[in-house]
Amino acid sequence: MSTEKQPAGRPRDTEAAGAIKAATLKLVRERGYGKVSIAAIAAEANVARQTLYNRWNTKANLVLDAVFEETAQYADTPQHDPNQSSKSQLERFLAQVFTHLTENGDPIRALIAAAQDDHAFRQVFSERFVKPREKMVTDLLRNAQNNGEIAPTRNVEMLSSFVHGAFWYALLNGDPVDNDLARNIAGEIFTHVPDRSV
Amino acid sequence: MSTEKQPAGRPRDTEAAGAIKAATLKLVRERGYGKVSIAAIAAEANVARQTLYNRWNTKANLVLDAVFEETAQYADTPQHDPNQSSKSQLERFLAQVFTHLTENGDPIRALIAAAQDDHAFRQVFSERFVKPREKMVTDLLRNAQNNGEIAPTRNVEMLSSFVHGAFWYALLNGDPVDNDLARNIAGEIFTHVPDRSV
């Protein structure tokens, strides 16, 4: 499900879309989500405002696409590596995610905020951004459970909610989202089983 | 730390403040946070708009006070009860909190959203609303750790973040915040120790 009003067509449209998304990320990082207007993005991207509106109907959808595209480039699904404990894999994955969150914390917090006021946007945000990331962690934990690194009685969906909830909670309350948090989360999720990486 | 601009003075002021807060909760529940104006609240409470502005400088602060006052009446610190396991106490406490969240989910989500755009408000929200609730759970878990219901190696601050994070995450993503969630959270926090209540 896409938030774009129409698919990319002629090459010129695709080029304009790329310039618009780059301008969006640049301005939102520099000024903060709330202080960036559609007009300012169009000016920065050097396109007519109508070109932008042809494709995105709200600022939230545009920012979602811009952040989403960049995220897709960095957040690979964690690959199972038999030489590494699942605990280490989770910690490394979270550290990657947190680096991106620290760079893009403001637009991501703004997207979460925008989703609270707009049910349709919340659904798109959930389907395109939240649920795919949640699934990556749930899959990692289920794999760990199959390997015996997590007790068979544990509820991996709930553990996955603990992982995401903990860093959303830190992000939204202005607490640090850093390597220490990655280590502490992984440590408590895997606390009761021996670390196989040592 | 209060968000009110001045303390309650004469009895008439206190009465007006009560009427304003009641009107705020009523309208926000009926229409949703985003659709309620300061003017509408003043009209509903039958006070001059200036009376309201004398006391609250933003809608977010007013809604925070209204929700906070109501919350203070219901969310007692969980009392330690030696006849009940800490797991049961946590589950019961969360079920209470979730009943309130289900009634006030929209204003509370709106407060979390408002806090993302306004650093000063985020700090007040954190100090008056978030941290005191977090401490209740951390204290309960620390007590459980002292009783041997949680292993001494566990990081109770992180576990408390898991608890709060899990229901914030559900709330903000539009997932159910109900008795099942309370049971699942308590079950995973206390999963590795015997339930002493049976």
Image (cartoon, coloured by chain):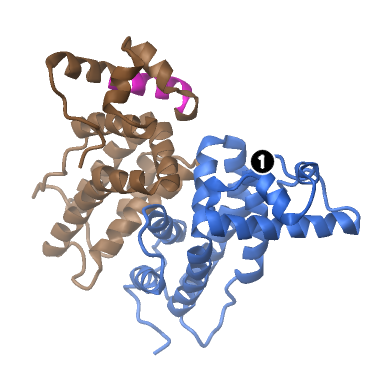
Chain colours: A brown, B blue
> Is residue A84 visible from the viewing direction of this image?
yes
- Identified by mark 1, the residue type is Thr
What residue sits right under mark 1 in the picture?
Answer: B58
Q: Is residue B90 left or right of residue B124?
A: left
Q: Residues within 10 Å of mark 1 (few under 14, many from 20)?
A: some
Specify the principal SS of the magenta part: helix
Q: Position of residue A27 (x, y in %)?
A: 40, 19
Q: Is residue A106 left or right of residue A146?
A: right
Q: Please state, as top left, top right, bottom left or bottom right, where the C terminus of chain B lies in the image.
A: bottom left
Q: Residue at x 43, y 36 (%)?
A: A110
Q: Residue at x 59, y 76 (%)?
A: B79
Q: Position of residue B181 (x, y in %)?
A: 37, 69
In the image, is residue A23 part of the stretch drawn in magenta?
yes
> Is residue B76 visible from the viewing direction of this image?
no
* Residue numbers of the magenta segment: A21-32
Please, is residue A191 above or below residue A91 in the view? below
Q: Residue at x 10, y 46 (%)?
A: A81
Residue at the limit of the structure toward the bottom, as seen here: B198
Of all chains, the one bearing label 1 is: B
Q: Residue at x 32, y 53 (%)?
A: A163
